[in-house]
Amino acid sequence: MSTTEAVRARRPGEPTRPAELATITEDLLTVVFGACLIAGVFADGWAHNNILADVQADGFFTAWHGLLYSGFAATAAWTFWLAYRRRDRTPRWWVDGWPAGYRLGALGVVIFLTGGLGDMVWHTVFGIEASIDALLSPSHLLLVVGATLLLSSPMRSWWAAGGGGPRAATGVAATALATTAASIFLLYASAFGSIAPVLPYDGIEGTMGHLHAALGLASYLVTTALLLVPLLWIHRRRTTPGAATALVAIVAMFPVVTREFPQPQTLAALAAIAGAAVADWAIVQLDRTRGMDAPLRLPIAGAVFAALVWASHLLALHLHSGIQWPVELWTGTVLSTALVGVVLGGLAARLYRIATLVG
């Protein structure tokens, strides 16, 4: 039976073949378009932080939203084109034509478009939000879900190809972009935007000093989880040099760039990136020395990452402004985040073993 006859003879809804892989060039272009989307988010975030009155006066139709939605339109159009260009092999291309990893990206396009239309209505009715409320409006939460699914398509394509190899660069870049999209809506709990360790601390429960310290510690724990979930998922099958650095770099720089490079946060962010680079090197060396099947491989990687990144971050804050936290608090912060790394590493290893058995 010919290919055409097989296509015609198949039952409705039955795929003609397993999803084929996108080419490396296709994944690379998806990352480029996704970077344009994130650049638009950076521009919009800068506008909200620095020229909010102008943004509120313009309403939804601002130049900053134009950059953001232009980046989305380019990424969305490219994602659908990837399926449409395979229509000769898969006539129902809108169902079966997506390259491996891109079907969820197409769903992300629909979710993002729904959120964008809702955002236009929301801003028309309620105006432009000024602070933390901007991160929690229903339309914005739809946008982050859609963006995360869309931007992570090359990451899933990389996994479908078996991980490693030349696709690693696009896979890691896509993971960093998707993680940044998610991090933007957790800015109120981001350690990279906080200077809590250098604020006065009196140790008295209920005071502002105590509140700042509690929120600061919570921000380190939340940001650790945000970064380690994708990092451990990347490392679960094989070592991927540069993954930690890429994740920390773009996530750390968002609150710094959009606030026009405040000095304490900027120096601390750069130190955290350097710590992530050292963590990358250490994880590679550990895997090379101990092997991929070594006991507690991922828990150790999680602990090493957290300890190096946050020790570097806190050291930079101390050198610039002087840490006001007592030694128990700042050392406990490093240890607590390392313990989060151990727990998440153990969960990642367990989930990977289950997935391997099921698969």
Image: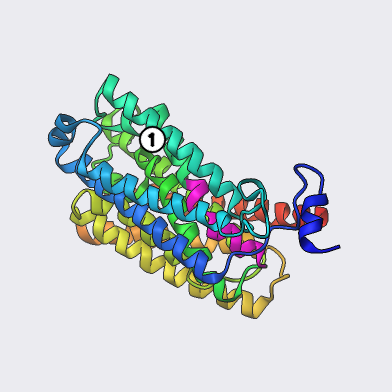
Residue at the (50%, 39%) spot, across then down: 110
Question: Dot 1 lies on which element?
Answer: helix
- The amino acid type found where label 1 is placed reads Gly
Q: Nearer the viewer, residue 270 or 17?
A: 17
| Residue drawn at point x = 78 percent, y = 62 percent | 3
Q: Is residue 160 magenta?
A: yes
Residue at the image position 54 percent from the left and 58 percent from the top: 82
Q: Nearer the viewer, residue 204 or 34?
A: 34
Q: Is residue 249 magenta?
A: no
Instruction: Provide residue 303's location: percent of width, then percent of height.
Output: 55, 59
Extreme-right residue of the structure: 1
The residue beneath circle 1 is 116
Of the pair 307 and 184, the residue shown nearer to us: 184
- In the rendered structure, the answer to whether residue 68 lies left or right of residue 102 reads left
Residue 56: x, y in percent?
18, 30
Q: Which residues are magenta?
A: 148-161
The N terminus lies in quadrant: bottom right
Q: Quadrant of the C terminus?
A: bottom right
- Nearest to the observer: residue 340 or residue 124: 124
